[in-house]
Structures are given as structure tokens and as C-alpha cells.
Amino acid sequence: MLENLFVGIADWLRSLLGGLGTPGEINEAIVMLAKLVAILVFILVNALWLVYMERKVAAYMQARIGPNRVGPKGLLQTTADIGKLISKEIVIPKKADVVVFLLAPVLIFVPTLMVFAVIPFGKNMAAIDMNIGVFYLLAIASLSTLFFWMGGWASNSKYSLIGSMRVVAQMVSYELPLVLGLLGVVMIVGSLKMSDIIAAQEHTWFIFTQPIAFLIYFIAAVAETNRTPFDLVEGESEIIAGPYTEYGGMAFAMFFLAEYANIMVICAMATIMFLGGWHAPFGLDFIPSWVWFFLKMYILIFIVMQFRWTYPRIRVDQLMGFGWKVLVPLALANIFITGIGMKIYQAIGW
Amino acid sequence: MKEQLAPVDEMKQKFSYIEFDEQKTVNVPADKLLEFMQAMKDEYALDFLTNLTAVDYPEENKLQVVYNLNSIEKGYTLMVKTDVDREHPEVPSVFPVWGGANWQEREVYDLLGIVFTGHPNLKRILLDDKFEGHPLRKDFRWEGGRE
Amino acid sequence: MLRTQEYFLNFGPQHPSTHGVFQIILTLDGERIVKAEPVCGYLHRGIEKLAESRTYTQVIPYTDRMDYLAAMLQNLGYVQAVEKMMGIEVPERAEYLRVISGELSRLTSHVLATGVYALDIGGFTGFLLCFREREKMMDLLEELTGSRMTLSYARIGGVADDAPEGWLDKLDKLMDEMPGYIEEYNGLITGNEIFQARTKFVGQLKPETAVNYSLSGPVLRASGVNYDLRKAKPYGIYDRFDFEVPLGENGDCFDRFYCRVLEMEQSVKIIKQAIEQIKEVDGPVMAKVPKVLKPPKGEVYHEIETSKGIIGYYVVSDGSNKPYRVHVRRPSFINLGYLDEMLKGYLIADVVAILGSIDIVLGEVDC
């Protein structure tokens, strides 16, 4: 029953539309639109919830209480914050490139939202199951670099500029180990389709067969989302807030929420690629598949938050050195070993 | 605990131009200052310029620059003074001897208007560059109200 | 052909990691520093000038406002200078209370420096963990002096009041817990691989340079120069305590940071001994001093070791009830004197690391 809750809703919508006598193609388009809107709402609500979760995790780690005034247990704190930010004036610096300056926070959400279209949240629960799903996701996700750069450049402030230079350097150089890390999995499965990758993990998750790839992916992904210890982009003790320095009000909130949406993307991706997606471990099938998916995703998010509140920030040259001298060679070695391993397996005929 | 003082009597024999009082505070003429200070650092191991300041004495028409030297190795201290004319206050900078004089001399220049000749970057340090006058002089009067 | 251009960056006066309103005008080549010009004075209040129109006792609260993080040590320097000038003997018990409150002040300052340095490097949790213990010490200081930061506890001739009943036991208990907390800081901050990578061999200072530039406090000792006035020229009753002077080896940011952590342990040790010894000392906490203080004509220079370095008070008296001139040798101010040279060739992130490791208080820098 619960297992098919969302699939059931979609089927019900489809049959409802079928009864109206409209052409099939239009019906499909409406169903697709409904799915995307549902994902959009889900992401935004989830991002709000993640901000709250981060604050509570931080408070717990720092011997504090955290938000506890607005709503029960402070649950409405971020909602109130967003309300405040919406009502604030967006200050535009005098010499800013106004069009680009205002476009950047709007566009920052676009790649994140597009990525979610291919993520399978449960059994048969991907909005679109593309046959190049992994490739699509990586291609779109790396677009967000551009919008950070846009914001930093258009602000016409030196701190913003330094921040956006760092964004480009960091995201471009960590894109590589990220992709190379995932390549090992793709090689084993032999498909870029998300559902194939998940199906291949029915018995053994790839975290056990590709542990190095998982580590490389996870580290690179944390860097990709600009989270501590790779938060040089914001680096509030060095360059104030990097590309967001000149943004205020809702424009800032957009960047802020996009960060959390990005964390969801990378953790969802890690779940799909390495933690068996929506597959239930130990045959605990009675719990719905989408619950498993979110559980795994949230555990990873929790780990990312733990990182943030434990580690200090790495320096820019160390960041580059670590990316190019450690992660990339390691990822290449992993691919090499995986390839040899696969050949040996084939030769033995397992 | 009694503080150890540098062997002033011995110095007097070496440098005839210095004078000292019962507190063993040495008074050096401004033109001999740099030479004397260099000797203090090299021969008496007074390697730590701990304090550099000045006092305004309008009645005697002089500004007195005060140097406090410590020896890390020997543990003794020495206070050196030099008097300068109020109208044309010029003292050689001891920056070549102790780098620590850099900011301290700028501060004295800023607040008392003593020019340290040979200082590499003698600018105001605490007050605004456009500020007029030197507040720690006794005849300074502020007439701008609250800023 | 690619052509690069140097540019200016105003690092401050409004910047999260200048610890106040300090400005460094950086000339940058990419992220690398070509030239750095520190600018201070944004918080200049003219304390030295103000002191000339106050009586000797009224100057004490002004000293609080300089290094407000270790106010007791500031009070102590001034008060001891005036006592030296007037030849006042301070009662035993007051001396012990001065040591206890002074070392507690040093602890609060060092705990804060440790936490803030973690924040400068980017670790927020270390910052708040340090505040947790600082809060406990502040509560104790408040109970003793009535104020959390601007203590004004020392008086010319003694201290304001005796410790309240049971206060020493509470302090003793906290000092018993302190080594555990310091261990926690070491676990979270000092031992962290990234923290060490960020701070080791960054901003190295040679011992000769440190001495030549009159640097003092942990900045000097991290370079391996054993110069702590509590040992070199023991003032008050410091010769009665058994403690060590922690020294660094490389003179880098990490050593400067770690010197403070080690000094915390020594401060705890001193306080423990002082609590032990004060139990046998009874009596007044104020010497008999005249109501109107008129030191004889003359001058005095007295220096003590604060948490930031050597603070020296040069007081000139003309025989009236107001000082003729008060000059303060402020350790934070003089420790910054070599900053411009130290920063050259490092990255923007290192500016924060180096500035933070010097541990300045702008109230003291700008006086």
C-alpha cells in the first residue's frame, strides 16, 4: 500500500485524465508536469528542513540548544527566516551589472531542479528514466559553476570576484575526480541508466565492491557543493561570503537554499550509485522503497553536516594539490584496477 | 623584587657625553644617540627595545624622548633619555638598531610631533592623516567639538 | 601573451577576521600578497591623554578598556607602577588575589584566542567549545569583581574586595576540570590534520627578528626565545610559584597557537598553587594608603607579562593628584609592527592565519 503510494497517485491521475477523453499525449504531458511540480515543491520544502536540521546538528555538536522559539521545537524557524528575507529589499551595488546580478540567483536553482528529474526516489519513482541518466546528471550539475561565477562577476566587488574565481577553479578541478569516481561503477554495470545501476545492486551494494570510488566521489562531491572543509568559496573568515557578498534578502536566500538542494543531489547520487538506491538491506522489504532511499540519503547528509562542524577550512593551494595530485591519480588507479578485475572475472567465468 | 640595572657607571667611563641621575637613568644628547644606542646593543646585550615614548615639558621648553631597553640574556634594564627642543624636535631614528622602533616612533611622531630623522615611513599611525596638531603636547587644545 | 595585473584589496576595517576595526591594505597578485600595509587607529580613544586629567585612581577603569579580554592584567600593570612610584607595600592576601584573578584573566584571554583562532581557520565548533569554558571563568570573575570583562579589580595598594565565601573552592573545582577541557581543544583543534596543514610553517619568525622587532608574549616565545617576565623579572609574588615557560621551535602560526594552549596549563598550575597558599594567609586586602594619592615628583616604568605580551606603564608624576603623563607600552600594538613583512608572499587565507596567531585586541592596539 505505502510502497506504491506515489506511483498510485500518478496512476490515478492518469486514469482520471483518461476519462476526460483528451488525447493520450496531452495526458502524459500533464502527468509529467504534475510530477515535476511535486519534485519542485518537495525540494524547496526539503531545503528548508535541511537548514533547520543543520542548525540542530550544529547546536548539538556545539553544546547549544539551537532554534527553539518559532513553532514546536523551532521547526518553523527557517520558514520565518525566509519570510524575513523575502520582505527585505534587494540592494543592488552601484556599479553592478544589474541584469546578470539579478539573473544569477534565479538561475542558480535551474540545474539543481533539472537534475532531480532523473533521480529515482523509489521503485518506479523517477520522473524520467533516461538511458544516459548519470551523464545527464553530471553534465547539468556542473552548470551551476557558471551561475556562481555570474553572481560574483556581476557584483563588481573584489571579494566577490576572488570568491567566484575560487568557485571556478574548485568546481572544475573537482568535477574530474567526481566523474572518474563514478566511472568504476558505470564500468561494472555497463549502463548509464539509473534504474540499471540500482538493479545491479540488488545483492551487493557498490560501496563494498568500489569503496575507493565511493570515498573519492564523496570527497569530491563535498568539494563540489562548497561545504567545509572545502568552503573556500564562501570562506567567511577570509573573503566575507565570496560570490554572495553583495547579495541580500531573497537573492541571498536563493543561493543559500541552492546549496542545500545541491547537498541533496550529491547525497541522492551517492545513494543511487553506491548504497543500492531504494533497495532494502537485509530483506527488510516491508518498509517502502522510497523510505529506504530517503533514509540513506539523510544519513549521508548528516555525515556532510558532521564534516562541516568538525573540520577547519583547507587553503586554496592545498585544495588544488589535493584534487589533482591525490584524488585524480587515485581515481585513475581505481578505474585501472576495476578494469583488470573485470577482465579477470570474465576469464575465470564467474 | 629589586630590578637589575645595567652597569651605568661603567658606561659613563666609556661614553663621556652621557649623564645619569640617582635612578641610573641615562641622559644622552640627541646627536650622539644613534652611536650610543648601537653600542648598547652590541656591547651590553641590550637587545630588546621594550618601550619608546616621549613627554612634553613646556616650562623647560623641551620634549623628552624615553627609551627603555631590556637585556634578555643578562636580565638587566636601562632607561635612556634624550632632550629635544620643542620648536624643532628632531631625533635620529633608532630604527636601524631595533626594528621595534618602527611603529613606536610613528606613534610618538603622531601624538607628540617629534620628527625621527632616518625613519623609513614616518606617517601618522593612530590619528587621521589630515589631523592637525599633536594631542599629547600640553598646549594642545581641541576645538572641533565631538567628531 | 597573458598579462597579469596587481590589485588592491581593503582587508578591513569591516572584516570578520580582523578581530575588530583593523585594516590591512593588501596589494595582491592573484591571491598572493605582494605588499601589505597595516592601518590602525580606528578605535583610538586617546586614553593616554584622558589619563592626564584624571586622578591616579580614576585611571584604573581606563586600563580595562585597552585589553578588555584580560582586564585584570592591565589593571595590575598600572597599579603596580603607581605603587612602585609611591613605595606602597601590598598585603600578602591581596598579592595572592591579584595572582589568582590575573591568571584567571589570562586563562579567559587564552581560551578566547584558541577558540577564535579555530574560527579564523574555519572551524566553528572549536570556537563555541572554547566559549563554553570561558563562560564559566567569566561567571567566577563576575562573582569576584562584579563585572565580567572590565574588571577594575586592582586598587592602588591592594584589591577592591576579598573573595566571597566559597569562591576559592569553586575556582579550585574548575581548575581541576580545566586539563580535561584543554585535552578536548587539543583533540578538536590542535590535532586536526587540516588545521596543522594550514598553520605549520606559515608565517615563520626567526628568533633574532622577533627580538629585534620587540615582539613579546607567545609570539616571541613561539620562536624559541625564553622571555617571560614572570620568570625573567618576577614581579609581585611570582617567584613563589613553580611553573614552566612553554617555548615553540619553528616560530610559525602553529607554535604561536600551541604556546597559548600550553600556557593555559601553566596558568592552571599557578592558580592551583595560589589557592593552596592563600589558605594560610589571612589579613587585609588593602594597604593603608592616603585618600588622595599624591606620588612624589618623578617617574617610573614598570612592565608585566599579560596574555598578549609585555605591557609596560610609564607614569610621570609632577607631585599633584593627577598623573603628568601616562604611556602604555601595548603588546598588541608592537606585535603588529612586523606584520607587513610577515605577510609578504603568502595567500589571502594565510593573512587570516598569521593575523589570528598574533592575537591582537584592537582596544589595545589603538589605545
Image (cartoon, coloured by chain):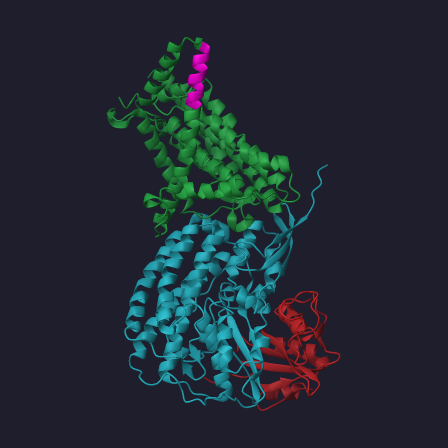
Chain colours: A green, B red, C cyan
Q: Is residue C232 visible?
A: no
Residue at x 65% of width, y 73% of height: B111
Provide the residue span drawn in magenta. A25-36
Quarter of the N terminus of chain C within the rendering: top right
**How many numbered circles are shown?**
0
In terms of depth relative to the viewer, which is nearer, C246 or A170? A170
Q: Main secondary structure of the magenta part?
A: helix
Give the quadrant of the C terminus of chain C. Answer: bottom right
Quarter of the image for residue C165 reads: bottom left
Above or below A222: residue C259: below
Residue B3 horizontal/vertical position (percent): 50, 83
Question: Which quadrant of the structure image shows residue C145?
Answer: bottom left
* Looking at the image, residue A140 lies above or below residue C190: above
Answer with left or right where residue C332 lies relative to residue B17. Answer: left
Could you tell me residue C140's position as x and y percent?
35, 68
The extreme front residue here reads A20
Q: Position of residue C25 (x, y in %)?
A: 64, 55
The answer to whether residue B18 is visible is yes
Residue A170 on image: x %, y %: 54, 38
Foreground residue among A85 and C288: A85
Q: Is residue C63 magenta?
A: no
- A34 inside magenta stretch: yes
Instruction: Identify which residue, A85 or B43, lies in the foreground.
Output: A85
Drawn side of residue C102 relative to residue C199, left or right: left
